[in-house]
Image (cartoon, helix red, strand yellow):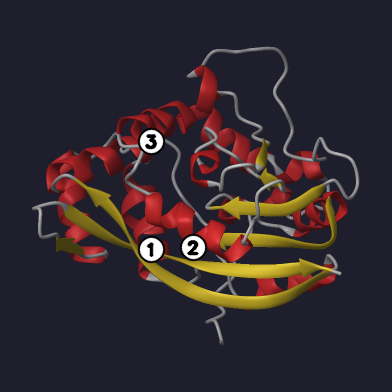
Amino acid sequence: MRVTDPMRRTRGAAASDDGEILSKTYQELFDQRGSAYDRAMRRYPEARRQEFEQAIEAAAPAPGMVVADVPAGGGYLQAYLPSGCTCLGHEPCASFTNHGAVAGQPTQLLPLPWARATVDRAISLAGVHHLDDKRPLFSELHRVVRPGGRLVVSDVAAASAVARFLDGYVGGHNSTGHEGVFLDERTLRELAEAGWTVENAAIRDFHWVFPDRTAMAMFCHELFDLRSSTPADTQAAIEDQLGVSTLANGGAAMHWSLMTISARRT
């Protein structure tokens, strides 16, 4: 598979190997809007089932395995893991679970809080496109995963319809803006530089599923914290830029896609 290499963008200080600097962009975004994101996920907990399931399928965890989820958001991945797996979630933004409350000092994304070679599978879903330089995270994941273990990175592909929607409509109307550093061939090179052997990289198409289009629009409006638009505008943008299918039961299936990369720790 060949992935289009888009025009690169940088954000100044984020182009550093310092994990503390690396995590600032992610933390600044979700310290502000993590609570709204979590409310949407709790309101429609099954909407993104297909997204979580395709990432877990790529990781292929077995009962008894330890699975790391980084960044974990509100811990949504755990509900989809096979019975008997132990899920270790790491999330630097308390806003996902404390809804804006301050509880002690903020957690940094890096270093990861686990000992060397203690994790069987690591999954990073829809979070790394907020990191300009992903190599420190990939290196830390390489440290904590056991030899023979697997990392799955599933995130928005560069130059995709989802990337354009996020950087365009979402970035133009939400509380923080959006300028993603999306996955492409550079990501594969960065994984290799961190010691990973990339085994597969593919675009996965799936749906976010809702009872109807109104629910779809309300979910996305809250998930992305779209303060300067209306749910009706959001519905129109989704239909125009992403596409929506009507299910046999009248539900709405919003088109979404991610690049899912599987890599082995040798």
Q: Which residue is mark 2?
A: 156
Name the residue located 57 percent from the left edge and 79 percent from the top edge.
5
Any part of residue 181 in sight: no
Q: Residue 18, position in %: x, y?
A: 83, 46
Q: CA distance from mark 1 to mark 3?
A: 19 Å
- The quadrant of the rendering that contains the N terminus is bottom right
Q: Which residue is mark 3?
A: 41
Question: Please, what secondary structure does the residue beneath circle 1 have?
Answer: helix
Q: Amino acid at mark 3?
A: Met
Disc 1 crowd rating (10 Å Cα; few below 14, some 14-19, many 20+) is some
Disc 3 crowd rating (10 Å Cα; few below 14, some 14-19, many 20+) is some
Q: Pointer 1 and pointer 2: residues touching (CB < 8 Å)? A: yes
On screen, 104 above or below 113? Answer: above
- Mark with earlier residue (1, 3): 3
Question: Please, what secondary structure does the residue beneath circle 2 have?
Answer: loop
Question: Please, what secondary structure does the residue beneath circle 3 have?
Answer: helix
Q: Which residue is mark 1?
A: 162
Residue 239 placement, left or right of 107: left
